[in-house]
Image (spheres, helix red, strand yellow):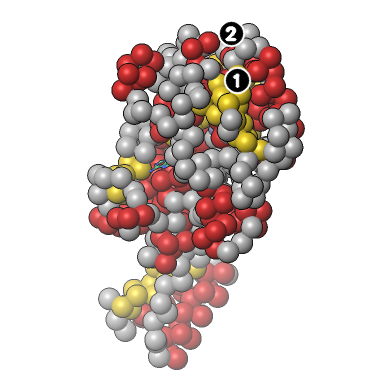
Amino acid sequence: MRVYNTLSRQKEDLKPIDGNSVRMYSCGPTVYGYAHIGNMRTYIFMDLLRRALKSNGYDLTGVMNITDVGHLTSDGDAGEDKMEKGARREGKTPWEIAAFYTEAFMADCARLHIDMPEITPKATDNIQEMIDFVSELVELGYGYETSDGIYYDISKFPNYGKLSGINLEDQQAGARVDVNVEKRNPADFALWKKAPKEHIMQWPSPWGMGYPGWHIECSVMSRKYLGEYFDIHTGGVDHIPIHHENEIAQSEAINHGKPAVKYWMHSEFMMVNNGKMSKSLGNVWTVSDLEKMGIPPMAFRYFCLNAHYRNKLNYTEDSIKAAVISCARFYEGAFAHKGQTGEVADQLVETAVREFFDAVNDDLNVPKALGIAWNLIKSESKSDAIWQALIKMDTILGLDIANYQPAAKEELDVPAEVSELLAKRAAARQAKDWALSDQIRNTLGDMGYVVKDSAEGQKLERK
Ligand code: AMP
Ligand code: ZN
């Protein structure tokens, strides 16, 4: 399998650190509100990667954190804790907010057939580990105390910026005047915040009552569950310049300069009408909002499969409508092959399956793979061999075509005489009396009806 590594800026052969096992960490949601469809695109990317790794026979251990404290309204150290903001908005405690939106997130993931990581730890269950990690950074000389927290001194980490390719000096020069005059460098970031009285979530620490910074959570939970050096780290592209640079600075400091992650993989953003999704523009939708708009979760998943994860995906009314239609055709087209006996060359089907998985293994080229599935579906000859191949492909696509139920067609309102003839014909077919079956078909034809035979039985249409 080849994957694009943000760190090396090129596709690389995936070579796991430890034999056949792959350990993967994915930045998870901040559970202060419903996840929007842009967030869900990033988790569908994680899901596709998991499915691809499994299809290659790797023994996968995935971790996705649940951020339930410490993520401020800016990705830096400014603003209110998102959890407390959510709590104030709804007149609940941050704990209630976290429990409610974690469950909502899990339900959305299930509806989108997202293959969930094996371990989904909560930040608030790992506070002691975070305190220990920060203490060690202070001991190693990377962390220092100010009146409002413990900060990371980025001048101690010369490699800062290697993931995003930012030049620290340029960044520092361009940084706006920082209100926090105690920081040694403008880009230093909080490892631990001392809690003002009104901050609801707070824990005792060597530096008084406080709560963790957002970036430390991921360094701590990845190390705890996956070890000091693991294979893959995923997230959205917005995390590259701050969150993941900070994670690298923390984790490599603890590792005495050695890397913590072998392959960094990031998915591009979902746009709406080529612009940003934002509450103020009224274009931030959840999976449930889409359902209310008549867009089933599987049509949204299908919509995401059509774009490569490293390209922006533009959501428009027309593009999602087109996906709803083509997704329905995909299911119907696939189902038309089920149980059918049409001739199709074994080699044609085998080649399609091989090319499908080759595309998936080429840095998750799922759009190309989907095109290969479509070519099979469009085959004139309807064959169960094609249906079986599509079922294999569906281990990646995740549309669950095996359980597809065709919508019941509206029954024709027909005279009793016609119903009786249909019943007689069904009995004749059961008894393999093809002559009688054909004779009844002709009689029905004279009466203005066409009978079609399919896997589900006879279908009657008006001529
Ligand atoms: P958050 O809950 O804000 O930490 O975001 C959860 C995930 O969604 C992160 O991996 C972000 O990179 C990702 N994300 C946020 N907005 C978008 C978007 N418009 N399109 C794709 N991914 C996004
Ligand atoms: Zn993270």
Crowd rating for badge 2 (residues with CA inside 10 Å; few <14, some 14–19, many 20+): some
Residue 309 in sight: yes
Q: Is residue 413 left or right of residue 21?
A: left
Q: Position of residue 37 (x, y in %)?
A: 42, 50
Question: Tag 1: residue type?
Answer: Tyr
- The relative height of residue 234 versus residue 271 in the rendered view (above or below) is above
| Disc 1 target residue | 144
Q: Earlier in the sequence, mark 1 or mark 2?
A: 1
Q: Residue at x 47, y 43 (%)?
A: 79
- The relative height of residue 424 versus residue 96 in the rendered view (above or below) is below
Crowd rating for badge 1 (residues with CA inside 10 Å; few <14, some 14–19, many 20+): some
Instruction: Compare residues 198 and 161 and report the one nearer the observer.
Output: 198
- The relative height of residue 220 versus residue 400 in the rendered view (above or below) is above
Q: Residue at x 51, y 36 (%)?
A: 46
Q: Is residue 37 left or right of residue 80?
A: left
Q: Position of residue 124 (x, y in %)?
A: 68, 41
Q: Kindly identify which numbered label has been placed on residue 257.
A: 2
Q: Residue at x 31, y 23 (%)?
A: 174
Q: Please tell me whether mark 1 or mark 2 is closer to you in this view.
A: 1
Q: Is residue 43 left or right of residue 378?
A: right
Look at the numbered disc 1 and give the secondary structure of its residue.
strand
**Which image quadrant shows ligand 1?**
top left
Question: Tag 2: residue type?
Answer: Gly
Q: Residue at x 34, y 75 (%)?
A: 461
Instruction: Compare residues 50 and 347 and report the one nearer the observer.
Output: 50
Residue 255 in sight: no
Look at the numbered disc 2 and give the secondary structure of its residue.
loop
